[in-house]
Image (spheres, rainbow, N blue to C red):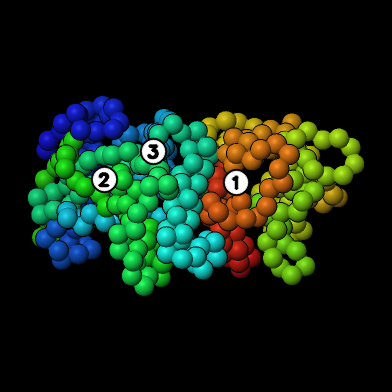
Amino acid sequence: MGIDFNNKQINYDKLSVDKYLQDLRLIGSLSGLFSSNEIPFLHYRTTENFYCADFSAENLSRADVSADAKLKTKGIGIKTFIENAELQKIAEFNNQQELYRDLPPIEMIKKVAELRNMRMQFTMNAYGLNDLIYHCIVRNKQGFYLFEEKMDFIDVDKIKLKINKTHTFIFTDSKQEYKFDSSKSTLYKRFVTREYFANVPVDILTDPIEALRQIKLGNDEPVSFYETKIVPLYEKDKEGRKIIYERSGLNQWNANGRKRDCDEVYIPFNKDMRDLYENFFPARDTSFEVELPNGEIISMKTCSGNDYIGKSLMSNPNKALGKWLLRDVLKIPQGQVITYETLLAIGIDAISFQKQPNGKYKLDFRKIGEFEAFIKCDDG
């Protein structure tokens, strides 16, 4: 096991790195459960969980943003791949195809690059990050090797198309090389693995099943389950199209009638959701605390209407949610109406609320399509 602290982007302490390497070594020894390859296997979700546990980082992997973990003010994108397989997937744009599919190749590439940059900036804004870093684990026959590099924004003005095939486009921006596969709506980046800051050998067990059988399970209490509900940031018009109305919802500040603060917003909470989520939120007009992705705490409540749960989700004061969401995260200028296309471009159109044991809630973002999948599952 070796460590060279000169070749890393983050100032880790040695004890945490040692623990992380030992955890990777342990899970790598069980590779025979999943693969017959002589190169140790490492599932990306396992890596994300180990990284967050050993470095006390916040796990963002379920939020479908550009970072898998948050370590103080740094966002960490965790990549795991076999040595010499240096072209790796970094983003998918299945839900944004309508924004680029009919464009000529170079314009398509530039649009995809812009969407990638917007998603990265959104991640930084939403989670209060100053930097984005790639943390990479390279696998070979000897074990695992770690290196890190900055997660660069793509320089759209310097894009040059190197290979232009039917569905495959390889391009550079003078700093990095990328590949976009339009048939899979997937963007790849070439990682050049020159300098490692740590490594650990891995001995693959010949009988991992028997090794697991030797583990003595304790009488620990069951794992707590934190109930989570998803709420869309949009409504639907008469034709069933997703829409953010010009004078309501996230554009409440633009409503007719009394003069309103430029940051006033609410999140629509329709009758079907009120019935389904009745016991999840407190009664109408009862405040509850919500932790935002950047760690800030705001007060929220459901209000309006006559049901047990109100038909609107608002912050208290009302402008607190709009200030954070519209100005700090989405960077919408004051006085500019937000549209559904704004959400489509960054790949999110819903938020989730996770209820904590203390009665508070944690808010996070959800990608396009997750609300529909969730409501279908939750409704049985």
Q: Is residue 62 visible?
A: no
Residue at the limit of the structure toward the bottom, as seen here: 166
Which residue occupies 14% across, 63% down? 37
Q: Dot 3, how many residues are within 10 Å of its Cα: few (below 14), some (14-19), or many (20+)?
A: many
Q: Position of residue 198 (x, y in %)?
A: 17, 37
Q: Which residue is mark 3?
A: 132
Circle 2 sits in a helix, a strand or a loop, which is it? strand
Q: Residue, x 89% and y 37% (percent of image)? A: 258
Going from N to C along the chain, the mark reached first, 2 or 1, is: 2
Label drawn at residue 166? none
Q: Could you tell whether 157 is left or right of 142 in the image? A: right
Secondary structure beneath disc 3?
strand
Please give left or right for residue 349 compared with residue 19 in the image.
right
Q: Which residue is mark 1?
A: 353
Identified by mark 3, the residue type is Leu
Disc 1 is placed on an element classified as strand
Residue 142 or residue 191, whichever sits in front: 191
For residue 38, say whether it is visible. yes
* Nearer to the camera, 329 or 4: 329
Between disc 3 and disc 1, whose residue precedes?
A: 3
CA distance for labels 3 and 1: 25 Å
Residue 298 found in image quarter: top right
Expressed as whole percent of the image width and height from the top left, the position of residue 90 reads: 36, 53
**Residue with the mark numbered 2:** 136
Please name the amino acid that badge 2 sits on. Answer: Cys
- Estimate the x, y position of residue 110 in percent, counting from the top left: 45, 55
Image check: 325 left or right of 249? left
